[in-house]
Amino acid sequence: MNCLLFKLLNVCSTFPYLNVYYNFDPKDWSKIREQQSRLANFRKRLSRLRRQVVTDMDRISQFMDIEKNLAINARGKLFQTALSKNVLPIKTGNKLI
């Protein structure tokens, strides 16, 4: 008998959840189910918002790359026109360089 009691106590100390009294009130379980569904909806909403932010960031980076390339091209064209208008040709003898 003592051996059986010792085994029982040992099992309860190993698995503490066996000592817990669970209340199977259906209202509590419906609240738990409602909270779990709300949590799942929040997770879906968060993942959707995350995806939207990532796509917006990609679009902004593509737009900034286009703007940067346009600015580089515009600066290059301005530099070319400035060179062509303001640089005087060098005369060496009868030839223009």
Image (tube, helix red, strand yellow):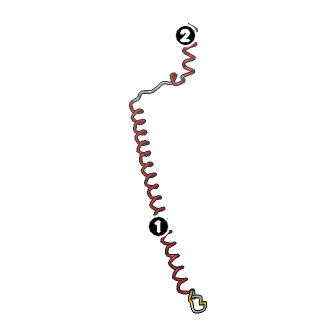
Quadrant containing the N terminus is: top right
Q: Which comes before the other along the chain, label 1 or label 2? A: 2
Q: Nearer the viewer, residue 25 or 78?
A: 78
In the rendering, at what x and y percent does residue 3 appear?
57, 9
In the rendering, at what x and y percent does residue 60 appear?
47, 62
Q: Secondary structure at mark 2?
A: helix
Quadrant containing the C terminus is: bottom right
Q: Nearer the viewer, residue 71 or 16?
A: 71
Q: Secondary structure at mark 1?
A: helix
Dot 1 amino acid type: Ile
Camera-near label (1 vs 2) is: 1
Q: Residue at x 41, y 29 (%)?
A: 25
Q: Residue at x 42, y 50 (%)?
A: 48
Residue 97 as seen in the image, left or right of residue 44: right
Q: Which mark is residue 4?
A: 2
Dot 2 amino acid type: Leu
- Residue lying furthest top in this view? 1
Q: Nearer the viewer, residue 16 or 56?
A: 56
How far apart are the two marked residues, 1 and 2, measured between alpha carbons?
Answer: 79 Å
Q: Which residue is mark 1?
A: 66
Image position of 67 with respect to 31: above or below: below
